[in-house]
Amino acid sequence: MKKRAPHPPFSCDPPLTRRPHPASIALYAQPMNHAPAITPPSALQGLLLQRIAKGGPIPFTAFMQAALYEPGLGYYTHPASATDAPLTGATGDYFTSVSVGKLFGECLARQIAEMWRTAGSPSHFWLLEQGARDGRLAMDVLAGLQAEDTACHSAAHLILVEYFADDDAQARLSAAIAPLSNNQVALANASHFPGSAGLPDPQWLTAQLDAWEISDPQPFGILYSNELLDAFPVALIRRCGNQWLELHVAAAETNTSPASDAQAFRFIPLPPATPGLAEAIADLDQQAQLPDIEGYTTEVNLLAPVWMRAAARLLKRGYILTIDYGLPRRLLYSPGRTEGTLRCFRRHTRPANPLQTPGLQDITSDVDFTALALAGGDPDPGQLPLHVLGLVDQQRFLMGNAPPLLSADSPLYPDGNLPPDLVRSPGYRALLRAWQALTHPEHLGSKFHILLQCKGMHTPNATPPTLRGLRFCRHVEL
């Protein structure tokens, strides 16, 4: 029964706010949806209007691809995004767990070190991060490995994958990371691997391992990503009558002021045109029973399963940690989520319209963790499947990987009584503030989840490895 009126596809679901301010819980109450009424047109706007004038309306997934990744003009590929105008932090557009400080990377390093030990502490392993941006998380992880297990740090060979705006950006990242990596670092431009959603292919990895003189036929590896898949371009679909249509982007029907591009584009629903979308909608409708509600609008991320299958091919033996905000499919496509999860961020505001200022605002949506689990469990012929170890929220994952001063089973103070001087010290108070920001159950602690998968780490009838990050995990049905 269709009971609801159509909804605009670009409003946000308040309970699923992205990237709240981590420095102070009081700041979470500040309004985040008051974007400036007038914004200057972006350099990308004219290019997109030309494409529409030449070929007609384009699927939103093509618009989002250009808005985020158009060479030299996209949000993540504009040269200024890595230098003069950082995307995260107080002077950027939003905060992330990495913005809180080094604690997040240090906790992640504790989990990586344990994974390395479950593999028998090999003398070398590759550690890959896609979406490395300025390398801050990678540097925090390397510093954490150095503190947690020097042998693990020495064995790590780091690979960073990013959409580099130019050669200078790649050189800056290489120089920044080198002092902490024993020069065992390689960089890859994600734009060179479009067929695998930016992830290097096995041939590239083999060549890189050869360059490092790693001849192990089954090299152990760990692949981690933080807020990567939410930035993959998505298709927008809407229930119209008794069918699902794909939202396309067309030029506005009325002339707009040169001072603003807020009305330069408009949405129009058309039959699905993005390759593979019609089949994906049919599968979703069968598996998740998409709500038959007039105007119901949601997203379909076609690239995320492609990326996960590429990750499964890349991994001979090891682990994949996918850190992002998202939900199992049954919750992501619930009847109450009538407007989907697509949302935008710019200068710590949440603009309501994803079509304005293309290239100047972030566009993001929640991850379908069920799709990732299904893709990993359906390998290519001759490949082992990815085994799902668990899906855990960030609060519980970090509790399992807490630093000694915050761990319930700390060997430093087994009686649980910390010295008063330590408790009053500025360093300990800063640690507590960072911990609260990362684990608060109403904010970062529950918004972000970690999907942990492994490949080749146990025989089919054996018990999979037990990881500390899942010690406090509650069972989540995917």
Image (cartoon, rainbow, N blue to C red):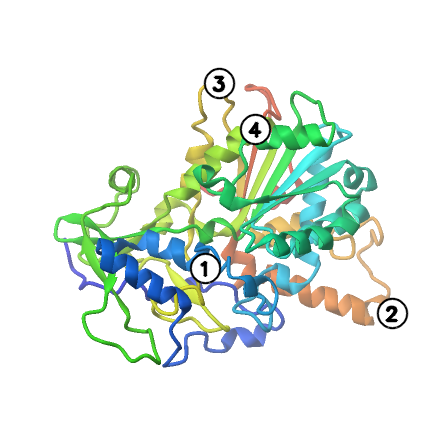
How far apart are labels 4 and 3 at the CA level?
A: 16 Å
Q: Residue furthest left?
A: 241
Q: Which mark is residue 235?
A: none
Marked residue nearer the N-terminal end (4 or 3): 4
How far apart are labels 2 and 4 at the CA level?
A: 55 Å
304 relative position to 122: left or right: left
- x, y percent for residue 331: 37, 50
Q: Which mark is residue 203?
A: 4
Marked residue nearer the N-terminal end (2 or 4): 4
Marked residue nearer the N-terminal end (4 or 1): 1
Q: Nearer the viewer, mark 3 or mark 1?
A: 1
Marked residue nearer the N-terminal end (3 or 1): 1
How far apart are labels 1 and 2 at the CA level?
A: 50 Å
Give the amino acid at mark 3. Answer: Gly
Give the amino acid at mark 1. Answer: Gly
How far apart are labels 3 and 1 at the CA level?
A: 38 Å
Residue 454's quadrant in the figure?
A: top right
Helix, strand or loop for disc 1: loop
Marked residue nearer the N-terminal end (1 or 2): 1
Residue labelled with disc 2: 421
Asked if the residue under mark 2 is in contact with the one under mark 1, i.e. CB atoms within 8 Å, the reply is: no
Q: Which mark is residue 382?
A: 3
Residue drawn 47% across and 70% down? 346
How far apart are labels 4 and 1 at the CA level?
A: 29 Å
372 vs 45, nearest the viewer? 45
Q: Nearer the viewer, mark 1 or mark 2?
A: 1
Q: Nearer the viewer, mark 2 or mark 4?
A: 4
Residue labelled with disc 1: 74
